[in-house]
């Protein structure tokens, strides 16, 4: 995609599987950027990128159908990308885990910010990414620098996490951060019994014996 001309709104495709969140983002963006389309999963996101050819794709990391990295991979492989170029991707996610940040950047994103960002900050981030800048929340920039410096063993983290399902990863992070089972259940809209089942599976797969060990394991890998 070409850089934006001065005074011209950046065009965006908004990708997130929660309709209420997309509506909130639209409200925050107002007229500062032009939202061409929305998408809730990988297939509709790829189709929207191909059809609308936005300047920036505002992309959630975890999506039905394969996640944000899969959107970038498939969109880049499409015939339209060869003729019109690829948009720039800005990840907007609730996750601030190191493996999500690093994996998404390796997948092709130009930036990564969390959903705690304010509306004006998000508008500025979109505009900067459209101009070719790399944009990260301050804490997340450290993850990327550490990964390139070799102080985070990305391959080892990926191998450990590959044993877990996406839901197990969500439960693991919340438990490791000190959430009670009841709080995890409320956060993820699942039953306490389901949380217990996922937690047992996580401990078994990671060969850990307690939530204390899990917290230490996650902290050592900078997943918190």
Image: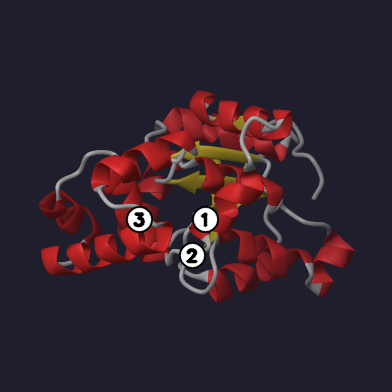
Categorize mark 2 by other alpha carbons within 10 Å: few (<14), some (14-19), many (20+): some
Tell me how far mark 2 sits from mark 3, CA to CA: 13 Å
Q: Quadrant of residue 142?
A: top right
Dot 1: element: helix
Q: Which residue is mark 1?
A: 160
Vertical position of residue 219 compared to residue 34: above or below: above
Please say whether residue 103 is visible from this viewpoint.
no
Q: Which residue is mark 3?
A: 170
- Residue 163's label in the rendered image is 2
Q: Is residue 151 left or right of residue 33?
A: right
**Residue at the spot 26% in from the left edge and 63% down from the top edge:** 200
Tell me how far mark 1 sits from mark 3, CA to CA: 14 Å
Mark 1 or 3 closer to N-term?
1
Q: Position of residue 87 (x, y in %)?
A: 72, 53
Vertical position of residue 202 compared to residue 176: above or below: below
Looking at this view, is 156 or 78 the one in front? 156
Dot 2: element: loop
Q: Is residue 188 left or right of residue 22?
A: left
Q: Quadrant of residue 16?
A: bottom left
Looking at this view, is 129 or 188 the one in front? 188
**Residue at the spot 22% in from the left edge and 39% down from the top edge:** 178
Q: Position of residue 121 (x, y in %)?
A: 48, 28
Categorize mark 3 by other alpha carbons within 10 Å: few (<14), some (14-19), many (20+): some
Q: Is residue 199 left or right of residue 63?
A: left
Mark 2 or 3 closer to N-term?
2
Asked if the residue under mark 2 is in contact with the one under mark 1, i.e. CB atoms within 8 Å, the reply is yes
């Amino acid at each position: 995609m070409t850089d934006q001309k001065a005074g011209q709104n950046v065009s965006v495709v908004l990708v997130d599987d929660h309709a209420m969140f997309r509506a909130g983002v639209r409200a925050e963006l107002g007229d500062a950027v032009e939202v061409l389309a929305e998408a809730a999963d990988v297939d509709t996101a790829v189709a929207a990128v191909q059809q609308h050819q936005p300047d920036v794709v505002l992309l959630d990391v975890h999506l039905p159908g394969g996640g944000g990295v899969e959107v970038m991979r498939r969109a880049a492989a499409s015939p339209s990308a060869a003729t019109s170029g690829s948009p720039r991707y800005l990840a907007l996610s609730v996750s601030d885990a190191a493996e999500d940040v690093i994996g998404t950047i390796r997948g092709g994103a130009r930036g990564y910010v969390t959903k705690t960002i304010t509306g004006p900050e998000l508008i500025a981030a979109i505009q900067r990414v459209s101009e070719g800048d790399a944009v990260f929340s301050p804490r997340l920039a450290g993850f990327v620098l550490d990964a390139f410096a070799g102080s985070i063993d990305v391959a080892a983290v990926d191998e450990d996490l590959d044993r877990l399902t996406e839901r197990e990863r969500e439960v693991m992070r919340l438990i490791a951060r000190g959430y009670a089972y009841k709080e995890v259940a409320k956060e993820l809209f699942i039953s306490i019994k389901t949380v217990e089942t996922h937690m047992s599976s996580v401990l078994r797969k990671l060969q850990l014996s307690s939530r204390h060990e899990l917290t230490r394991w996650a902290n050592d890998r900078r997943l918190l």
